[in-house]
Amino acid sequence: MAPVVSYRDLRKQARRKLPRFAFDFVDGGAGDEAGLDRNEAAYRAQCLQPRVLINSDRALPLKRRFLGRDWALPFGIPPIGLAGIAWPEIDLLLAEAAEQAGIPYVASTPATVALERLRQRAPKSAWFQLYVGKSEEITADLLARAKAAGYRTLVVTADVPRPGRRLRDLRNGFALPLKPGPRLAFDLMRHPGWALRTARHGAPRFANLEPYAERGSSTQSLAQLMAGQSSGRLDWALLREIRDGWSGQIILKGVSAPQDAVKAAETGVDAVWVSNHGGRQLSSAPAPLDALPGIRRALPAGFPLAFDGGIRSGEDMIKALTAGADFVFAGRPFLYAIAALGPSGASRLIAQFASELENTMAQIGWSDLDLQDGAG
Ligand SMILES: Cc1cc2nc3c(=O)[nH]c(=O)nc-3n(C[C@H](O)[C@H](O)[C@H](O)COP(=O)(O)O)c2cc1C
């Protein structure tokens, strides 16, 4: 098998190893996917200016301070719902890899492992991501459980007022439970590794929501419960209520307009997370890398900014830091890393990103990550 030295290699191998419906669920974007393409293209259009004669004959430091903590690296693993479709209980593998590497891991509301177990695997690194669903009781209970489990940092996702219209999923008829039929049987036959692992561990579950389903209920009713977890109910007043009720830190995720970033800061969140959900919600949304400088300018100096969307390498991360991000996240690459390489995939990807970061810094003459004007 060809060596894996980049994101492209990981994606290619993951595509071979995952059934079509699973790869498409992870890989796909909303509508015509122009937004997904734009997210990645924004990095290709951006140059970094090499600077020379800056003695860098040593390992360059990659640590980064964000929200009051020194992280070993300037990136983390964002919330990914239904990630278990790529590998059974992948959430545990991601949480563990993040904890070992000293980077944040965000447990998602639709995770395939319960938030309590994830927190145990990553007691220093795990944050919890909340979808404000239709049910007030479930939202309140998820928050109470997150608090009881020891989560201090809450990520409230703002950019899912409706489920995204992902045409690949619609064409594949992707829904839980998986619809048996010749198409699914053929897909599974061509991907026996995935099929066997899934048969051994069971189909991915919405583990956080199971306590709210009727006893003995089907995956179908859980899927309906999950559909109720993305609602348009979140507004500024409700965000304020959540702010007042949560004693830890809050990050508002899914912001792409400067006005919304300013409002979020005024509402008392501790950080804004610039993101368009990896192009999965609105194809016409601006690329986060393009939206970032305007948001940075609109916010008070030093206001913490997290960022994601289309990051595929350490070099991309440097571009996001240069454009105004304090801390970055990469989503799909982590699922492809484990789908392609197995359980060690996340740690191997973290090492790959670190090596790309260090190399890029040396090429542009940065002696540490705080010297962002070194790229000018
Ligand atoms: C399969 C998949 C599931 C996701 N599920 C969630 C989720 O449950 N909550 C959330 O806030 N964001 C979710 N996201 C968005 C990611 O947190 C992140 O914003 C996005 O993946 C970044 O783009 P990238 O994949 O290009 O790096 C999901 C993304 C993917 C690819």
Image (spheres, rainbow, N blue to C red):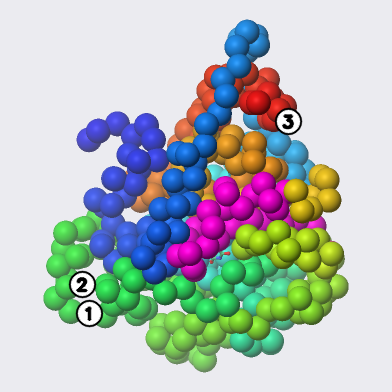
Q: Around disc 1, counting alpha carbons within 10 Å, would you say few (fewer than 14), some (14 to 19), or many (20 or more)?
A: few
Residue at the disc numbered 2: 184
Within 10 angstroms of label 3, few (less than 14), some, or many (20 or more) residues?
some
Q: Given the image, on which type of amino acid does mark 1 rest?
A: Pro
The first of marks 3 and 2 along the sequence is: 2
Residue stretch in magenta? 268-296
Q: Quadrant of residue 370?
A: top right
Residue at 28% over, 77% down: 173
Q: Which residue is mark 3?
A: 370
Q: Could you tell whether 298 is left or right of 29 in the image?
A: right
Q: Is residue 355 left or right of residue 18?
A: right
Residue 209: in magenta span: no
How far apart marks 3 and 1 lie (CA) works out to: 53 Å
In the picture, measured across the screen, residue 196 lies left or right of residue 162, that is: left
- Please tell me which residue lies in front, 166 or 356: 166
Residue 291 is covered by the magenta coloring: yes
Q: Is mark 2 within 8 Å of ligand 1?
A: no
Residue drawn where x is 40% and y is 59% of the image: 34
Residue identifier under label 1: 180
Q: CA distance from mark 1 to mark 2?
A: 6 Å
Q: Quick check: can you spot residue 162? A: yes
Amino acid type for the residue under numbered disc 2 = Leu
- Which residue type carries mark 3? Asp
Q: Position of residue 200 (x, y in %)?
A: 32, 64
Q: Are marks 1 and 2 in contact (CB under 8 Å)?
A: yes
